Image (cartoon, rainbow, N blue to C red):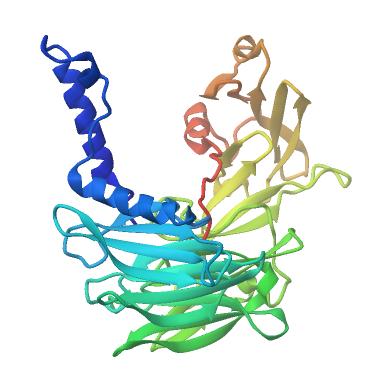
Amino acid sequence: MAKTGGKLIRALALAALCLLLGGCATNVSTDRLYALPRLPAEYASLETEINALLSTGAEHAAPTSGSNLQSVQMVDLDGDGVEEAVAFFRKATDQKPMKIYFFKSNGSSYEQMALIEGTAGSLYSIAYYDLDGDGQREILVGFKSGTEVQMLSVYALRGSEPLNLLTTAYLRYTVSDLDGNGRQELTVFYSGEENRCMVDCYTWDDRELSCISTLELSFSAPELSRVTAGALSDGKQALYVTGVADNSVAVYDILTVKNGVLRNVAPDTASSASDGGFRFLSLYPADIDGSGVVEIPEPVPFPLLDEDGEVYYRILWHDYDSAGNSTVVRRTFHNAADGWSLILPEAWDERVSLLRGGTPEESSVLFFRRDGNGQTQPFLEICALTGSGREERAQRGDRFLLARQVETVYTAELLPCGDWAGAVDEDAVKASFSLIVAEWTTGEN
């Protein structure tokens, strides 16, 4: 990931600090005291180079997605410990309007070292990876024309002329060492014939990027939703690929590389070949238990309280190994409407139902146990309290505090239910409860 001008920021902060410390001297003039701090000479020269480009009619054109979004980025491309500057511009009057300038420091100033140009209308993303293992980073540029067409170009900077290693249409791409040989593979997802979702896996072969394997996924290109890189339960690296159809059904493919071949190790239950996929509840593969292994979410309905009742889902989180074998490692309930989740004991499987209700200022979820005769009895209530009287209401009865936010108090109450295998106490509820944190992402490459 690119460093974003840390040295420049530190230099500005140091200069400002010097001004503040110098303010106590009686011989410092008012003009000098309130003057802007001067940039170090090398950064002043970079600013001069950028201003010269802007004066020709170019405008800043930062990437719109991915993790590198600044219009000027500082990154050590050649591995010598000194950051190069990468600046992004658009000059609408040129035949190739998109321009990426690379500036190298000579110790006292920056000077232009290379230029990449593109005919696309905008710059979608940029990333920096060492794909050939030589210690120098290649440049991966996502160009975008219109609303749909994206092109990925991979460049090597060897001197003043960037060498184009690959240009291909793409939907998503990721870089990860999938075969464990210490060198990263580039995996490109794209739309094939009849909107099939296809994957090409590239690796460095002698002096070029070579496509070593191609695979068709279990869903169409328009259904491709997310690609998550992470570990399998046996330590192998994989790509967890989510496809979502009609915003309601999710299918998952798990991609690895073995003996130079791209393989989908997801069984039918994960790739939907037999049952049409899982219900999509806006949950994606994630390391849900902090084990370092990525798990896949499977929504399973809670038993209904009555035939006409609303259906609620518990989530079974499966980890997978490279042979496609799966184990359920965690069970959760996600109450997205109220912003909390709960880890569920295995003993609750098929024995617990729930009901969501309450008022606008007191939203509640009641958990019911089902005995051997099919009778149900509530044993736990979790509430999200809002409004002006929320603090007072949080202390009613035997409620105990779970969490507090600016405008919401979360409480729980254990209800008399007798002894049973799934019984929980206050400490267990507190340990199992967590707030749902909104996912922040800058987008995919």
Q: Is residue 42 left or right of residue 367?
A: left
x and y percent of residue 354 in the render? 72, 39
Camera-nearest residue between 46 and 195:
46
Tell me what residue is drawn at x 51 percent, y 51 percent.
442
Residue 319 in sight here: no
Residue 21, percent from left and from top: 15, 19
Q: Quadrant of residue 256?
A: bottom left
Residue at 40% from the left image edge and 70% from the top image edge? 116
The vertical placement of 12 against 71, above or below, is above
The image quadrant that residue 198 belongs to is bottom right
How far from the left and from the top, in percent, is residue 414?
61, 25
Residue extending furthest toward the front: 56
Q: Report x, y in % for residue 69.
A: 45, 52
The extreme right residue here reads 308
Nearest the viewer among 137 and 179 is 137
Q: Does residue 244 appear anywhere in the picture?
A: yes
Report the side of 192 relative to 403 (left or right): right
Q: How many marks?
A: 0
Relative side of 195 to 442, left or right: right
* Front position in the image: 140 or 246: 140
Q: Residue at x 15, y 52 (%)?
A: 108
Q: Which residue lies at the image location 25% right of the left edge and 76% below the top edge?
A: 159
Residue 171 versus residue 219: which sits nearer the camera?
171
